[in-house]
Image: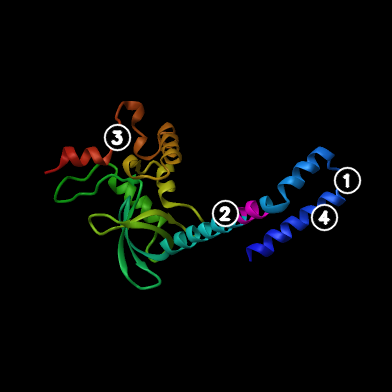
Amino acid sequence: FWDRNEQLICQEWQYMSQSAMSFTPTWRNRMDSFFSGPACRTRHIEATKTALFSCMLCLALFFTSAVLAWEAEGLYVHDGDSLFVRKIATGEKLRVRLQGVDAPEMKTDHWPPQPFCVRSRNFARQLMPVRSRVDIRGNGKDQYGRVLAEAVVLPDGRRVQEELLKAGMVWVYRNYCRDCDSWKKLEKEASGARRGLWRDLDSGRKPVPPWRWRRGARR
């Protein structure tokens, strides 16, 4: 295989160098030296191997990402950053955590409800009604057994995390995001437009992010 391919490549150059009148003599001599003899064989075998390896690596990455993406049916949105779904392929019911964003906390045994939590949850429910279909790109599970969704994609191609950020319904969870730069920009735009939880900034009331709320309000 290698012998045949390097022979064809070298023969092709020899044909081009003889027929292409646009090459200057100096340039043609340099290319003849590169594409002839043992040097041609060594260079092109290595180049072919490198090209094939690159293709195989790209295919491996493609199929890996494809395996991690799966279709689900929405069952219940718990709050602005977590929901329950049913995996279409297996029927398995799973709890999903939207990775990279953090929504106002609902009431629990550990803390009272955080301001704006209901509006954040209701907006997420509008994006993902019961029995709606979404594509989920999973990234393992957290300590609570929730699937960490790097992306939840709606049928029209929009990403749920980005829509929540645009509407000012969540914060960028900076320690756990992969698209931090672009998502920070969306958060900044929502803040500048006083959308959602940023609406009272002009009156000096800055919203408290959930990670601080959990620490300060824990019972």
Q: Is 64 positioned to the left or the right of 204 in the image? A: right
Residue highlighted by disc 2: 50
Amino acid type, label 2:
Thr
CB under 8 Å between callouts 3 and 4? no
Q: Secondary structure at mark 1?
A: loop
Q: Kindly report the distance in space between the C-alpha atoms of the residues bearing marks 1 and 3.
A: 72 Å
Question: How packed is label 4: few (under 14 Cα within 10 Å), some, or many (20 or more)?
Answer: few
- Please tell me whether the stretch drawn in magenta is mainly helix, strand or loop: helix
Q: Is residue 65 above or below residue 197?
A: below
* Quadrant showing the C terminus: top left
Residue 147 is situated, as x and y percent measured from the top left of the image, at 32, 58
- Residue pointed to by mark 1: 21
Work out how far the residue at label 3 is from the one at label 4, CA to CA, in angstroms: 72 Å
Rendered view: 72 above or below 31: below
Left or right position of 200 against 66: left
Residue 89 position by quadrant? bottom left
- In percent of width and height, residue 36 lies at 73, 51
Q: Amino acid at mark 3?
A: Pro
Q: Which residues are magenta?
A: 41-47
Mark before the other along the chain sequence, 4 or 1: 4
Q: Nearer the viewer, mark 4 or mark 2?
A: 4
Res 15 label = 4
Give the amino acid type for the residue marked by disc 4 in the picture: Tyr
Does residue 113 sit above or below 146 in this rendering? above
For label 3, the residue is 207
**Label 3 SS:** loop
x, y percent for residue 191: 40, 34
In the rendered image, which quarter contains the N terminus?
Answer: bottom right
Q: CA distance from mark 4 to mark 1?
A: 12 Å
> Identity of the amino acid at label 1?
Met
